[in-house]
Image (spheres, rainbow, N blue to C red):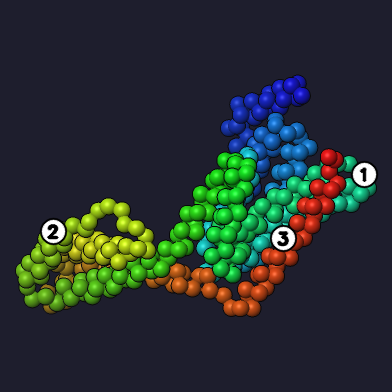
Amino acid sequence: MKKSRSVLLAIGAFLLTNLKWLLGILKFSKFGTTLLSMIVSLWFYAVFYGWKFAAALVYLIFVHEMGHVLAAKRKGIATSPAVFIPFAGAFISMKDTPREASTEAYLAYGGPLAGMIAFLPALPLYWWTQDPFWALVIYLGALLNLFNLMPISPLDGGRIVSVLSTKIWLIGLIGLGAMLFANPGPLMVFIFIIGLITWWSRLREGYQHQVLQYERGSLLAFLDEITKWPQLESSWNKRVELGEEVALLDRSIPSKGFLIPFLQDEKRLKRDRLRLDRVYAHRKWDLFKQWEREPVAFLDSDPFRPAPSAILNEAEQTAMQRLTEVEEQMHRLTTYYTAPASTKWKVLIAYLALAAVLSGFYMYAQHLLPR
């Protein structure tokens, strides 16, 4: 055992010292990142568990991730290459954001489904050879994908059941909390923390919508305001008005300190509205001073045809861009998790069926493994 570990460590040292050379070869490959991270993970797993176990585990994780990639491709969503992280699995990131939870559930379902298909060849291999290694492959495949089906975001199960109700995430968190209490581990702690943050963010979406709605109104008022400036006969009165508005809001400093969510949301919303009022008052004031100093340009040198202000045009484009972002966020908050009843039934049946089949394979593999 010590001898094999020494050999593996020597190979690892060689790869690390020649990493630049290796990267030079892999960068020409579309899957260079995936391949390199896969090799590193394979080496780490092999050091601790041996090559056979490492190869089986990396293979199962790879096919699982490719299931996500294939599902994303079918939905027209671009993804990053799969990246392996030793002792944490692998992940892909979406370059495009799904417009509804049902699409995200489809992408999430592709991983455990492909992961189940990945270990099916081990069944006839075990029946033919009676080698416990193939029973271990079945066991690992079923366990990995069953764990991923836990209804906790960001696990695949959490993304799938979000179509049904995000309230299910709390049940998953309670279940994972019980597992942590019985058998704590750093990876499960990390997943629990991320899941808790995601669940809490979902609970606070109603409040986020209120803040965004107020900002939308502020943006519309800002755009309406700056379109009137070129028609002003004199800028003095407007300068005084904007200066007084800024001075008044600067004196109305919002209270600091912690406010209890839900119980003190009214005070929190008042504070956030005041913050936004100050932001847009200062933005108007700073913009107005820049606009006043801007040299007046004329179209075709005609003194009766002043050219549009470049400063105001740029400010209008920036505000319109932010307005689009705010409206998209508001739309997402109100519609992302909505789905017709037929879709919910399909997702529920597919989720329970896959969980049941994986559970069956898990129990069967446990029976096959030597005790």
Q: Secondary structure at mark 3?
A: helix
Which residue, given by chain and number where applicable, does mark 3 sit on? 355
Q: In the picture shown, does residue 114 fall above or below 326?
A: above
- Residue at (50% x, 54% y) in the render: 196
- Distance from label 1 to label 3 (Cα)? 28 Å
Q: Tell which of 308 and 151 is nearer to you.
A: 151
Other-residue count near label 3 (Cα within 10 Å), few / some / many at <14 / 14–19 / ≥20: many
Which residue is the site of mark 2?
251
Instruction: Report x, y in % for residue 114.
Output: 72, 57
Query: Where does the C terminus fall, quadrant-wise?
Result: top right
Residue located beneath label 1 in the image? 129
Circle 1 residues within 10 Å: few <14, some 14–19, many ≥20? few
Cβ atoms at labels 3 and 2 below 8 Å apart: no
Mark 1 or mark 2: whose residue is earlier in sequence: 1
Q: Amino acid at mark 1?
A: Thr
Kind of element beneath mark 2? helix
Residue 290 spot, x, y in % from top left: 16, 60
Mark closer to the observer (3, 2): 3
Q: Quick check: 244 left or right of 168?
A: left
Task: Classify 25 as above or below 273.
Answer: above
Which kind of residue does numbered mark 2 sit on? Arg
Residue at screen point 70% across, 68% down: 350
Q: Nearer the viewer, mark 1 or mark 3?
A: 3
Q: Amino acid at mark 3?
A: Ala
Dividing the picture into quarters, in which one does residue 269 lie? bottom left
State yes or no: discs 1 and 2 in contact (Cβ < 8 Å).
no
Q: Earlier in the sequence, mark 1 or mark 3?
A: 1
Does residue 196 show up? Answer: yes
